[in-house]
Structures are given as C-alpha cells and as structure tokens.
Image: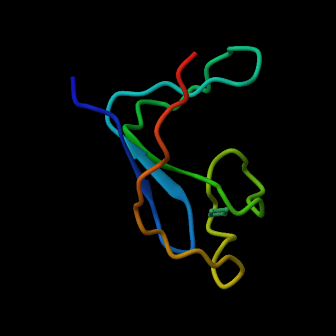
Amino acid sequence: MSKTKLTINNNGSVKVEGDFEIVDSQGNSYNLQGRTVLGICRCGRSNNKPFCDGSHRNHFEHEATAFDLPPMKKK
Ligand code: FES
C-alpha cells in the first residue's frame, strides 16, 4: 500500500492520494467509488463539500509554502 500524501494546492484544494478513507463526524465512510486521488475543499465554496468542485477558482487565495510547526508540548 502506498503512503497517503496530501498536497496543499496553491489557491485551491487539498489533493489527497494514496490509501485513505474519508469519514463523516459520525465515522461513516464516504463511498469514493474506488478513487485513489481526489481534492478536499479548503475554501468553503464547494457545493459538494467536503470535496472540491472547482468553485475556488478566482475566489480563494493562498500560496502554500511548507514550514516547520513548533515542537509538540510534552504532557
Ligand atoms: S477548494 Fe475547490 S471548491 Fe473549495
């Protein structure tokens, strides 16, 4: 199985690819019909949330550049 990879696209969705499952807040799985690559909306404009439907185009700006998170706090 391939490692799941999330790509934060500039001005758009989060591309998810690999071996993954998407569930709702109750833990029910979305039937992805075998898809191994799809886009998750992060702009809030999709009419098909949580999936991207392209509505972000020309309405959402975020240049994604990777950075380091601060160290985890020890419990
Ligand atoms: S990121 Fe594509 S519709 Fe929101």
> In the visual, does 60 lie left or right of 74?
right
Quarter of the rendering occupied by the C terminus: top right
Q: Quadrant of residue 45?
A: bottom right
**For this rendering, which residue is in front, 70 or 52?**
70
Q: Is residue 61 above or below residue 29?
A: below
Q: Quadrant of residue 52?
A: bottom right
**For this rendering, which residue is in front, 2 or 53?**
2
Which residue: 26% across, 31% down?
A: 3
Looking at the image, what colour scheme do you see?
Answer: rainbow
Q: How many numbered dots are placed on residues in this image?
A: 0
Which residue: 21% across, 23% down?
A: 1
Q: What is the x, y in percent for residue 58?
A: 66, 85
Which residue: 72% across, 80% down?
A: 59
Q: What is the x, y in percent for residue 63?
A: 51, 76
Q: As drawn, which residue projects farthest toward the bottom? A: 58
Q: As drawn, which residue projects farthest toward the left? A: 1
Which residue: 40% across, 61% down?
A: 66
Q: Quadrant of ligand 1?
A: bottom right
> In the visual, does 72 lie left or right of 20?
right
Q: What is the x, y in percent for residue 24?
A: 71, 25
Q: Is residue 31 above or below residue 41?
A: above
Q: As drawn, which residue projects farthest toward the front? A: 74
> In the visual, does 5 lie left or right of 72?
left
**For this rendering, which residue is in front, 66 or 3?**
66
